[in-house]
Image (spheres, rainbow, N blue to C red):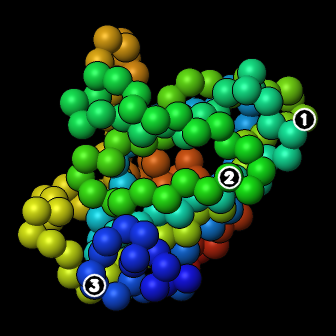
Amino acid sequence: MLKFLQTLTGIDEPLIPDPYFEGGGYHEIKPGGVLKIHTDFSTNSITKLDRRINLLIYLNKDWEESYGGHFELWSKDMIKCERKILPTFNTVAIFSTIPLSHHGHPNPLTCPPDRSRKSLALYYYSNGRPANEISEDKLTTFKGRKDVGRDVIPKTTREIIRDFIPPIILKALKSRKN
């Protein structure tokens, strides 16, 4: 699998899967939810390796176009959506983690209340990357689409993390600090 991904993407450096699923793993978004357009963090905070590849596997059986939730890749100037992928069961999206890979699903899900958009996110890293792919911005950065008012409401990294971590885990982490 790793050799296949290297060949597919043209990455020369050996790829390493993320054993910690930092930011990856199972993702679920409920009706009305969005994932604003963003660029991803570029360095794993645990291993300090460079994040190179995102591989998303969609887990949504019988997903209808009208539900929305398309995975969108946006132009570097954020003027237009270049590609849209409907998140249907067993669909895979693979893309490079570089400073210009703006992606997300910015429009609210319109699926029925008993449905949700599910995916498995796998990240692959390397020890180093080409100089032209190095970014000063190492954190996930949300981007506003052109001609869409208040598309992004600024949040701190801590607030974003709180949105994704289940309350029971937050409680356990807080108790460890005390």
Of label 2 and label 3, which has the lower sequence position? 3
Residue 152, image quadrant: top left
At a point 29% along the width and 65% down the height, the residue shown is 42
**Which SS class for mark 1?**
loop
Of label 3 and label 1, which has the lower sequence position? 3
Residue 31, position in %: x, y? 74, 30
Cα–Cα gap, marks 2 and 3: 26 Å
Residue 27, image quadrant: bottom right
At a point 19% along the width and 55% down the height, the residue shown is 137
Q: Which mark is residue 91?
A: 2
For label 3, count other residues whose C-alpha is less than 10 Å away and answer few (under 14), some (14-19) or many (20+): some
Amino acid of disc 2: Thr
Q: Is residue 47 above or below residue 140?
A: below
Q: Quarter of the image containing the N terminus?
A: bottom right
Q: Which residue is mark 3?
A: 13
Residue 90, image quadrant: bottom right
Amino acid of disc 1: Asp
Amino acid of disc 3: Glu
For label 2, count other residues whose C-alpha is less than 10 Å away and answer few (under 14), some (14-19) or many (20+): some
Residue 93, position in %: x, y? 55, 54
At a point 22% along the width and 30% down the height, the residue shown is 77
Query: In this orientation, which residue lies closer to the viewer: 46 or 77?
Result: 77
Residue 170, position in %: x, y? 60, 63
